[in-house]
Amino acid sequence: MSSSSIGRHIGVAFGVQKQVEPLRRDAMAVYRIYLVHDDGRLEPDASFYCRTDADAVARLQPTTRRDVRAELWQGGRFIAVAFRPQPGAEQRPHAQS
């Protein structure tokens, strides 16, 4: 290594954990609700911690406006959407088996 390049290097230290801890069962994830407008605007609404997707979905509510939907995300993973149907939208009955 030349003396002119010594100042450009950065030292990095790594620690090694000898015992791996078991996965915590009480771990919580961060969930975010975004409001998505029909015109393409994206508006952050809420951020919170939950233990499961089901707990987070329970907090998701449709907005009062018909032109805005609420989307629930956990990191880059889409979870659910809540919205109010447009007036006159066709309501499809459940398929019967």
Image (spheres, grey):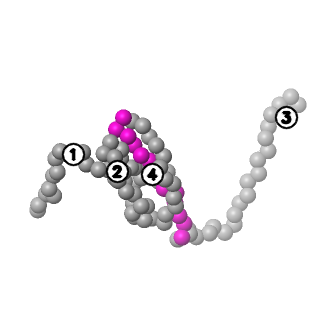
The answer to whether residue 68 is above or below residue 60 is: above
Name the one closer to the observer, 62 or 48: 62
Q: Residue at x 54, y 66 (%)?
A: 27
Name the residue tied to disc 3.
Answer: 6
Type of amino acid at the residue the image marks with label 4: Ile
| Residue type (three-letter) at the residue carrying disc 2 | Thr
Q: Earlier in the sequence, mark 1 or mark 3?
A: 3
Which of the two marks, 2 or 4, is nearer to us in this view? 2
Where 51 sits versus 78, above or below?
A: below
The amino acid type of the residue labelled 1 equals: Pro
Q: CA distance from mark 3 to mark 2?
A: 62 Å
Label 1 to label 2: alpha-carbon separation: 13 Å
Name the residue: 17% across, 51% down: 91
For marks 3 and 2 on the same chain, the one whose residue lies earlier in the sequence: 3
Residue numbers of the magenta segment: 26-39
* Figure quadrant of the C terminus: bottom left
Q: Gap in Å between the C-alphas at discs 1 and 3?
A: 69 Å
The residue indicated by pointer 1 is 87
Marks 1 and 2, the one that precedes in the sequence: 2
Q: Is residue 4 shown above or below 36?
A: above
| Image quadrant occupied by the N terminus | top right
Q: Mark 4 = which residue? A: 33
Tag shown at residue 71 = none
Q: Overall secondary structure of the magenta stretch? A: strand
Residue flagged by tag 3: what amino acid is it? Answer: Ile
Magenta stretch contains residue 8: no
Element type where label 2 sits in the image: loop
**Tag 2 residue:** 64
Tell me the distance, in whole angstroms, between the alpha carbons under discs 4 and 3: 48 Å
Which secondary structure lies at badge 3? helix
Of circles 3 and 2, the one toward us is 2
Q: Is residue 32 located in the magenta-colored stretch of the structure?
A: yes
